[in-house]
Amino acid sequence: MRRIIFIILCSFTSVITFGQSSQNWHWKDLNSDSVHGISLQKAYQVLATLPQKPSPIIIAVIDGGVDTNHIALKNLLWTNTKEIPNNYIDDDHNGYIDDVHGWNFLGGKDGRNIDKASAEMTRIYHRYKNIYEEKPIDTNRMSSKEKSDYLIWKQTQNEIQISENDLATLQYIKMAMNALIKMGNILLKEVPDSNFTIPKLEAYQPIGRITLDTKMAYLRTVKILGIENETTYPDIIKDLEEYIESKEKLANAKEIAPPLIREDIIKDRYDDFSDKYYGNNDITGPNARHGTHVAGLVASIPDSSWNLNRLYPSIKIMTVRCVPDGDEYDKDVALAIRYAVDNGAKIINMSFGKSYSPQQAWVDSAIRYAAQKDVLLVHSAGNEFYNLDIKQVYPNTYSPSFKDTAKNVITIGASSDPSLKHFLLTDFSNYGSKTVDVLSPGDKIYSTLPGVNNYGYLNGTSMSSPIVSHIAAMIRSYFPQLSAIQVKQIIINSAWRPNDPSLKFAIPNKETDKTLLEVSMTGGIVNAANAITMAKSFKAMAPLSNERKKEVRIKK
């Protein structure tokens, strides 16, 4: 599931007006700007002292699609030079026709795409419903695989429902959306810009009394809902519609089986992992909002006023589309990782996750394949405010199949800054002193959005992860001798930490305080300048011997 935050609150929320100076707060430096950013400009100043030039580095963005026409991204796209564009021939014989800038595992050969998918929980429940429901079950007579399937199904049976409180909230949101649509229709008769935001509407002086009253009612409603200042009117309605749709699906999930959309569009044999040459080359897809925002953060295009473009790491972005609006499929994720690795990616950004993974072994194998090829995977922790030391989400670093923990994955939680909401921590980021490696800015993050020259704010650990991917790219571009695991160590060890590790920080909308060591293993926030400085003096390990390489086994 794409990890993007849309806040629904039934209470008044403080609203921050962003000026140009706050547009990229996550780049700022604590000492010089009094903002808990990643010290990006200072990192570039450190790079300016280095004698070496940046080496090319490919970052794969496994996501829901990227707008390849965006002015800030189109020149950064990875190009498969072995493939001749648009000749409908698999020139490089890798099984994927015309994969010039990446691949789409959610597409059909007829050009159609999966946009929305059901939750994995729903898919599991209905897959086994006729087998287990109201049937006498004796787990002692089951094989270990059958018992595991049954227990997972029982778990989904207990969870596949919507609470009374959620139903009440759903009805409230539906009424609020309908009211906003009616108010929007009135406002748009007079307001010149249909993409108006809260600040633009606040500044607008209505001509008529009806428009004035409507303006005030609109502003009260969006503030009650906790909607971000810079969200446009069309995006507010779209977000509300998606929220309502997802909740209504959950409310009906137990009775209504999910449509067989994969069988209709992709037409692969899903349970056969060897059936892997499916999809198409439409890497933008029908909804590239999330992936485009992530790609912009992976690129972290420098502010032109810095005049530091010559120091920009030699980044190329490979897009692998496999994350729909809904839960991703394990097979697609596993193949996406392998595709990225086989085509030269040294960093893979994975801003997605889910609560069930029935084919976890496929993904686990792909992660360990990436480790064997020295590829770093940067994964967002998720946005449910779960304690991941207790509650599992997937992909997961620990593999029951391999009985080990992947060391080439770095898990990222989201931080904020007191200048935004008076808090350093967020009320959405998953956390865990044993499972989340480090924090990175994820609150009100500005980046690219679909459109030739469109930008905007999104929240979530989905934003935290690509910020770390860019730091990893800086290190791997200027210090290519360092391994993926060493880059992970540098990012973790160079994080900013409070002088007093026992210092507790309040969490917005939660009656709890936590130390940074309670929310992550590192107890800190990533810092690009510290990371580059540490990389300068970090000694690389000797490469694996041939004997040691033989010990690395990858399960298919």
Image: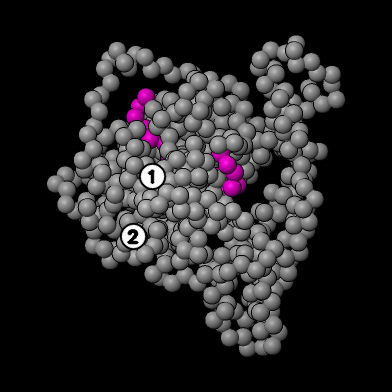
List the residue tagged with mark 1: 469
At a point 53% along the width and 34% down the height, the residue shown is: 395
**Most extreme residue toward the left, as rendered?**
51
The magenta segment is: 372-388
- What is the tally of numbered marks visible in this picture? 2
Query: Quick check: 368 above or below 80?
Result: above
Q: Quadrant of residue 549?
A: top left
Magenta run includes residue 375: yes
In the image, taking residue 359 as reference, residue 413 lies left or right, namely left
Please tell me whether mark 2 sits on a helix, a strand or a loop. loop
At a point 58% along the width and 86% down the height, the residue shown is: 205
| C-alpha distance separating marks 1 and 2 | 18 Å
In the image, taking residue 266 as reference, residue 471 lies left or right, namely left
Query: Quick check: 517 above or below 168?
Result: above
Please tell me whether mark 1 sits on a helix, a strand or a loop. helix
As shown in the figure, which amino acid type bears the numbered disc 2?
Asp
Q: Position of residue 265 (x, y in %)?
A: 62, 36
Q: Position of residue 4 (x, y in %)?
A: 55, 51
List the residue tagged with mark 2: 29
Q: Quadrant of residue 69?
A: bottom left
Q: Position of residue 512 (x, y in %)?
A: 59, 53
Looking at this view, is 501 or 125 the one in front?
501
Magenta run includes residue 43: no
